[in-house]
Amino acid sequence: MNTTNIADLASLLENSELGKKGLEELQFVMNTIADLGLQSAKLTFDITLARGLNYYTGCILEVKANDVAIGSIGGGGRYDDLTSIFGLKDVSGVGVSFGIDRIYIVMEELGLFPKNIDVSTKVMFANFGEQEAAFCMPLLKQLRAAGISSELYPQKAKMKKQMTYANNKGVQFVIMVGEDEMESGILSIKNMESGEQSNLNTAALIKELS
């Protein structure tokens, strides 16, 4: 793969405001990956990468399997105001599409289908806002690494809506992280079946749920 270090492009684009903005966005992605401890994902910057669709306005990406000789299994990127085509202006986002047939082939070849594939989400982190969600992301990663099926509610919303979602999905525990929890490191955990609430740090929570 033809790759280039992002820093190597700084001098080439020093007179381009648009180019410098692009480098800032790419560096933000790299820094965020590092902050979450996801370097094992083997993220590589490839200056030759291009997507066929012209609505992308920022970072684009492709996903490849490490140990199977197959093309990309997913791809996408950042787009601004794409929804204006459908009458909804000023809404930006990031989209990724996956080739389910290729993913199936990879998982089958590597024996990756889990025995507990039918197990639903066990733990859900409630979403109280951008800062709280950012705080929860490393905790979510720890729970998943311990084999605990977990997710973060995708956006800030009224607690009733989040709890209804958890109930409908059969989530066993909802973790609520606000300002107090962020300062103390003690998580507020609600048992959705009994309604009981407890307070544990991440290590104790993993030990209890594992």
Image (cartoon, rainbow, N blue to C red):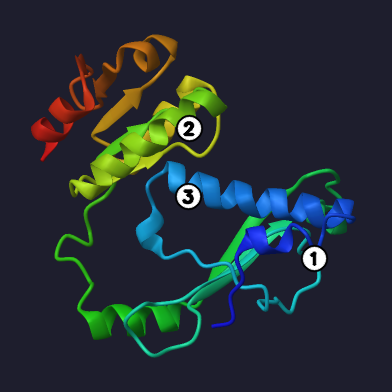
Disc 2 to disc 3: CB gap under 8 Å = no
Between 46 and 165, the one nearer to me in the picture: 46
- The three-letter amino acid code for the residue at tag 2 is Ala
Judge depth for marks 1 and 2 and give the one in front.
2
Camera-nearest residue between 16 and 98 = 16
Under circle 2, the secondary element is helix
The residue drawn where x is 65% and y is 58% is: 7
Q: In the rendered image, which quarter contains the N terminus?
A: bottom right
Mark 1 or mark 2: whose residue is earlier in sequence: 1
- What residue is pinned by disc 3? 33
Residue 167 visible (yes or no): no
Q: Give the structural element (helix, strand or loop) at label 1.
A: loop
Three-letter code, disc 1: Tyr
User: Residue 134 — which label?
Assistant: 2
Give the spatial CA distance, label 2 vs label 3.
12 Å
Q: Position of residue 12 (x, y in %)?
A: 80, 64
Q: Nearer the viewer, mark 1 or mark 3?
A: 3
Residue designated by label 1: 55
**Residue for point 52% across, 67% down:** 44
**Number of numbered tags placed on the structure image:** 3
Indicate whether 170 appears above or below 7.
above
Image quadrant in which you'd find residue 179: top left
The amino acid at mark 3 is Ile
